[in-house]
Image (cartoon, helix red, strand yellow):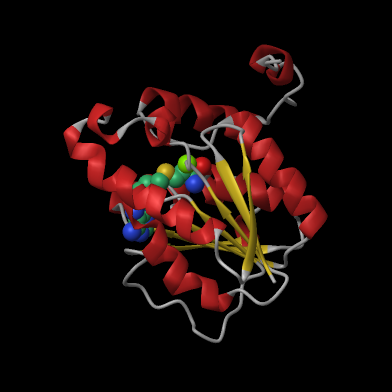
């Protein structure tokens, strides 16, 4: 039996004015922020996990970073974004939020920047270029201690992940192939217990043993 998205969405809690402004900005400017039901699932699991240090790959305008910081007032978030215009927007929105002291935005390509290699992150949220998930994972999973969790968004890729490759638009085939290879690899990885949460655009949650 199918569940009803509308029914679930009727329980989404109201957000403050700044968040509503950001949601509107994202919609009007085609910024792909995380969908509300998926953010709620992510935040609820973060409440249970209680990570103190979170690394986010893919800040966009700072929406998910602010939502996570509001959910976990004692946690610090480092978030990486390569698009210079979005970094400016994110820093501005974050400065106007109540959680600016919890969030550090790093401008640069997550595959190139140096995050202090002595830092550890008990939660890593990967939400950037979908064809690069394996590489993000390889670079950042060593910073996650045993018991830490990696949260990975857009595993469903708006339904493309599920199609026969010949039905995927040609320019997206490499990305989808990479995403599927990543899913097959991580699901069978001895060091992680991963579960696919069918919420939003598909959230994969991997616990490091
Ligand atoms: N997490 C945000 C949405 C992120 S959208 C939210 O839910 O509010 C994905 C972002 O990842 C885009 O802004 C894109 O510019 C950024 N991105 C893609 N590849 C990247 C990379 N290699 N390094 C840093 N940022 C990247
Ligand atoms: Mg996403």
| Residue 89 shows in this picture | no
Seen in the image, is 30 located left or right of residue 127?
left
Q: Residue furthest bottom?
A: 118
Question: Residue 98 location in percent, x, y?
Answer: 67, 48
Residue at the location (42% across, 30% down)?
158
Residue 81, picture quadrant: bottom left
Left or right of 166 in this view: 188: right
Q: Is residue 67 something that shows in the picture?
A: yes
Say which residue appears at 65% left-offset and 17% top-offset: 5
In this view, 79 is above or below 113: above
Residue 151 percent location from the top left of the image: 59, 54
Which corner quadrant of the image does residue 4 belong to? top right
- Residue at image location 61% in from the left, 78% down from the top: 120
Expressed as whole percent of the image width and height from the top left, the position of residue 57 reads: 46, 58
Q: Position of residue 112 (x, y in %)?
A: 31, 72
Q: Of all residues shown, which one is farthest toward the right? A: 48
* Drawn side of residue 60 relative to residue 198, left or right: left
């Amino acid at each position: 039996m199918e569940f009803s998205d509308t029914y679930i969405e009727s329980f989404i809690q109201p957000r403050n004015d700044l968040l509503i402004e950001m949601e509107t900005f994202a919609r009007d400017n085609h910024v792909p922020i995380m969908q509300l039901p998926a953010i709620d699932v992510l935040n609820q699991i973060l409440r249970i996990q209680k990570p103190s240090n979170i690394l986010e790959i893919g800040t966009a305008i700072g929406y998910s970073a602010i939502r996570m910081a509001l959910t976990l007032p004692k946690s610090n978030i480092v978030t990486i974004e390569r698009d210079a215009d979005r970094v400016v927007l994110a820093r501005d929105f974050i400065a106007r939020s109540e959680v600016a002291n919890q969030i550090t935005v790093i401008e640069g390509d997550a595959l190139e920047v140096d995050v202090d290699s002595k830092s550890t992150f008990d939660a890593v949220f990967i939400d950037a270029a979908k064809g690069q998930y394996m590489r993000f994972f390889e670079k950042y999973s060593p910073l996650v201690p045993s018991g830490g969790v990696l949260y990975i968004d857009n595993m469903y890729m708006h339904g493309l992940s599920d199609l026969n490759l010949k039905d995927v638009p040609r320019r997206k085939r490499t990305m989808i192939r990479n995403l599927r290879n990543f899913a097959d690899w991580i699901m069978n990885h001895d060091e992680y217990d991963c579960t696919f949460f069918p919420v939003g655009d598909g959230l994969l949650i991997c616990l490091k043993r």
